[in-house]
Image (cartoon, rainbow, N blue to C red):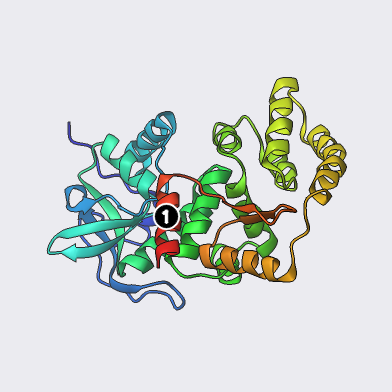
Amino acid sequence: MAKRQALGRGLSALLDNASSAPEPRPLEKGSIGNVAGSIAMLNIAQIEANPFQPRTKFDETALNELAHSISELGIIQPLTVRKIAANKYQLISGERRFRASQIAELDEIPAYIRTANDQEMLEMALVENIQRENLDAIEIAISYQRLIEECNLTQEKLSDRVGKNRATVSNYLRLLRLPADIQIAIIEKQLTMGHARALITVEDPAVQMRIFKQVLREDLSVRKTEALVRTEKPAALKQSSAKTALSFEHQKLRADLRLTLGRNVELKKKEDGSGKIEIDFMNEDDLRTIIDRLNN
């Protein structure tokens, strides 16, 4: 059944004729990328999904609700695409609107057409997603990590890109050092960001897991979790001080490894001179990245 190409009042005001593409207009100063044409109505079949989309899960109920809204009111905020071939476009941002439009069986959708290389496209998709989508804390942290690693951003530049202060960015990145069980609990909303912020102040993963299990078992509030962390820290500190202190040379080696790998690295040394190096990783892909860096 053909769907009417309804447009929201905000977008209708921008288009002289909703059934045809408008005349190209220059992009406002300060925008990312170069404009091939301002807002245009594109055949939805000509648009392919964004391979760099950092979000992998979409709430089906929310998508259906958005599809219903689009059927009634149209798309008020255009998507952003890049032209990759004649009559072929690739989505840069607006994945939820794109999917909902498919559910609503629209034939055409409004879009900004830009040119961007793959790195620019990835950065735009990640930044747009962080700012506009209801990502969980781990998804945000992974997006931040990808911006740093794949777009060669420092934490300072990253904080400017996403409009967050550096301490906030750093706290999100520290979530990726938490044990996998705790990260999954954050994704599944068993733990809040407040609980996570308390847990990341604990250095010992074993202590983190012990507190985590107690939080779930007793359904502790953030305040009670923070109090529990404070009581655990002195014991953990005492246990840590019993280990052989690292020499300046070993401390520098540990710092160099952390800088080279971009991961948390622990170097532990015993009195007999033996010891071990521990490197945190998030998943199999992350492990392969670490191995590649060690081999280079």
Q: Residue visible at 59% across and 63% down?
A: 258
Q: Is residue 54 above or below residue 181?
A: below
Residue 11, position as x, y percentages in the image: 37, 56
Work out whether residue 23 or residue 237 is closer to the camera in this orientation and state it.
237
Specify the amino acid type for callout 1.
Gly
* Apparent side of residue 96 relative to residue 265 in the rendered image (left or right): left
Q: Quadrant of residue 72?
A: top left
Residue 267, position as x, y percentages in the image: 65, 56
Q: Residue visible at 54% across and 50% down?
A: 140
Residue 201, position as x, y percentages in the image: 75, 48
Q: Is residue 71 above or below residue 281?
A: above
View extreme (left): residue: 86
Residue 17 visible in this rendered orientation of the protein: no
> Where does label 1 land, which residue?
10
Q: Residues within 10 Å of mark 1 (few under 14, many from 20)?
A: few
Tag 1 secondary structure:
helix
Residue 124 visible in this rendered orientation of the protein: yes
Work out whether residue 153 or residue 294 is closer to the camera in this orientation and state it.
294
Work out whether residue 111 or residue 246 is closer to the camera in this orientation and state it.
246
Q: Residue visible at 81% across and 39% down?
A: 229
Work out whether residue 19 or residue 81 is closer to the camera in this orientation and state it.
81
Quadrant of the image containing the C terminus: bottom left
Residue 39, position as x, y percentages in the image: 30, 63
Q: Residue visible at 56% across and 58% down?
A: 263
Q: Quadrant of residue 235?
A: top right
Q: Quadrant of residue 52?
A: bottom left
View extreme (front): residue: 272
Q: Is residue 11 above or below residue 137?
A: below
Q: How many marks?
A: 1
Quadrant of the image containing the N terminus: top left
